[in-house]
Amino acid sequence: RDLGARLAGKYMTFLLGRERYGLEILDVRELIGLQEITRVPRTADFLRGVINLRGKVIPVVDLRLKFGMERCEATEQTVIIVVQCQVAGRALTMGLLVDQVLEVLAVGAGDVEPPPDVGHGAADARFILGVGKHAEHIVFLLDIARILSNGEAEELARAAA
């Protein structure tokens, strides 16, 4: 019950492949269409590069690569979700490259289940806070601050510097 109460709220939902994910709406700053992403040499694969957003350099993470899927191929629906979170005590603004933004979804406390127990790979899934049920769909509710390890967050901060 506590989990549902803690995770109930509004989520920006999006697609990666055929899977639905949700980010707490409070973490989302804005949505921008795909633009030119400048690759940063010698950074992790999932770090697609940086963009210039109104004079601010922002790192862009390909969530498909981060989650072990195939690289995101750009379509008209491809969107960069600009989010802000606290990682290792510092505010980090980054773009998340996703296949398509769906809707803002209100998730009720009764519609949240704990994350699936996937066994030994669970360390990789620590950024999934819970699973929201909506109509016939499952939505993985993400903790944006946990998607990156501290080392990865440092790398992003350096890339943006």
Image (spheres, rainbow, N blue to C red):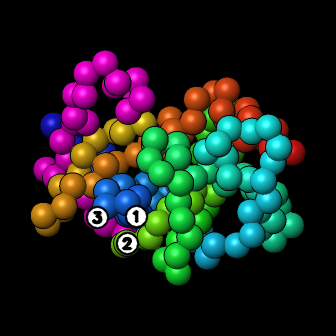
> What are the residue bounds of the magenta stretch?
104-126
Q: Amino acid at mark 3?
A: Ala
Residue 87 x %, y %: 63, 35
* View extreme (bottom): residue: 76
Q: Residues within 10 Å of mark 2 (few under 14, many from 20)?
A: some
Task: Evaluate if marks 1 and 2 touch, with contact meaning CB atoms under 8 Å apart.
Answer: yes
Classify 78 as above or below 70. Answer: below
Quadrant in which residue 29 is drawn: bottom right
Residue denoted by label 2: 102
Residue 40 x %, y %: 81, 48
Residue for point 12% across, 64% down: 136
Residue for point 25% across, 21% down: 119
**61 left or right, relative to 49:** left
Q: Which label is found at residue 14?
A: 1
Which quadrant is the C terminus positioned in? top right
Quadrant in which residue 46 is drawn: top right
Mark 1 to mark 3 CA distance (whole Å) = 14 Å
Q: Amino acid at mark 2?
A: Leu
Residue denoted by label 3: 106
Which quadrant is the N terminus positioned in? top left
**97 left or right, relative to 99:** right
Q: Amino acid at mark 1?
A: Phe
Q: Tell me the SS state at disc 3.
A: strand
Q: Who comes first in sequence, dot 1 or dot 2?
A: 1
Q: Residues within 10 Å of mark 3 (few under 14, many from 20)?
A: some
**14 left or right, relative to 87:** left
Q: Which label is found at residue 114?
A: none
Q: Residue 9 lies in magenta, yes or no?
A: no
Q: For marks 3 and 2, give the one nearer the viewer.
A: 2
Q: Who comes first in sequence, dot 1 or dot 3?
A: 1
Residue 109 x %, y %: 19, 50
